Amino acid sequence: MKKLFHHISSTISKVLSALVDCIIPTMPILIGVGMLKVILIILGPSALNILSESSDTFTVLSFVADAGYYFMPVYVAVSSADTFKTNRYIAALTGAMLISPVFVELVDAGRELTIFGLPIASTHYGNQVISSIIAVWILSYIHNGLQKYLPESIQPIVVPLVSIVAMVPISFCLIGPIGVFLGNRLVDLIMWLKNLGPIGNAIMCAIIPFITIAGLGGANLSAMLLLASTGVDPILFFSNVLYNNILGFVTLALYIRDKKAEMLASAITAALGGTSEPALFGIVMKDVKALMALCIGGFFGGLYSGITGVKSYAMASFGTFGIITTIGPDSSIINAAISMIIGCIIGFVLCYVTHRKNDE
């Protein structure tokens, strides 16, 4: 039993390590566009109202910031190629084909596609990282295997051609359906948690880091839209706001301990900008105690918000300013603020007390 536990623990550690290695090189992009979003929120109508949402400056900077996330499958594919020791340019194409404008248009139009007679999952891959990482991991075996066994004389033509053609059905017909299945199950889980009352809110906020790690943000949004159609969201939107702020404070605790500048930038990006990836993938995932502090803070913050009936009546940024969405017919902004204070203090204190410099 001890040997089995060690094997499972070692496998999980290797998987998480590979995920971190694939995502860490993209941190400058994530931090850069995350801080840009923070600036837009502060200067925009949500705060100082210096920039109008209709101004060209706001519009251009917004789509530049969004591009940093939308094209994540390509950025992560390139860094994954370095991790899995395969061709970076074919890997980049593997990530790019997932977000091809033509494919996106066909999905939006409801067109059912097939390749070699196999059905293609109609889903969006923008902002996704896990699908791209898995695709490049599989590509590394195909591409490197072809290089190993084919004669050198035909490799320049055959290796890229076969690699690309092979990855099309694998990416769209295998990895895609797995993501759709997991996404649908996540929506079912969220609806089930909604009916559990306060404990459902607590669990929801505690598991959001793992939903993000699994790359199931699209399912998160689907459930949010489903709840929004009822006019009120009693569990999901504010849980995301709560999670991002607790993540910001946990990362701030790490910054105070380790004094690394990127930690402070990631903390600000998470809390104010509502963008969790730089802090979660780049920092917190490397320290299991920090990850547990985040989950525990989320649990108790979510528990209080559930007990006091915090609800969201609109959708906005997942950052601190997202708290204004709790203003409505039955306003709960005071209890929303208290739940954020509870979660942030618990997460910060637990992380600060348990963390040791260079914990990983």
Image: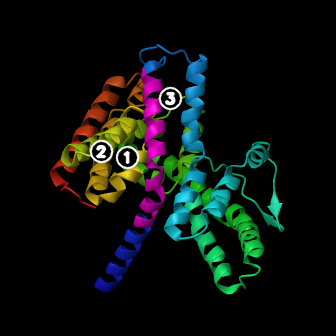
- Dot 3: element: loop
Cα separation between marks 1 and 2 = 7 Å
For the point 67% across and 66% down, the residue is 174
**Outermost residue, right direction?**
117
Give the label on residue 26, or none.
none
For the point 55% across and 28% down, the residue is 61
Residue 40 forms part of the magenta stretch? yes
Q: Which residue is mark 1?
A: 279
Q: Amino acid at mark 2?
A: Thr
Circles 1 and 2, Cβ within 8 Å, touching? The answer is: yes
Q: Which residue is mark 2?
A: 251
Position of the C terminus, as image quadrant, is bottom left
Residue 299 forms part of the magenta stretch? no
For the point 44% across and 68% down, the residue is 15
The image quadrant that residue 344 belongs to is: top left
Image check: 353 left or right of 339?
left
167 to 210, vertically: above or below: below
Please state the extent of the stretch shown in magenta in the rendering: 17-42
Q: Earlier in the sequence, mark 3 or mark 2?
A: 2
Residue 217 locus on image (x, y percent): 53, 48
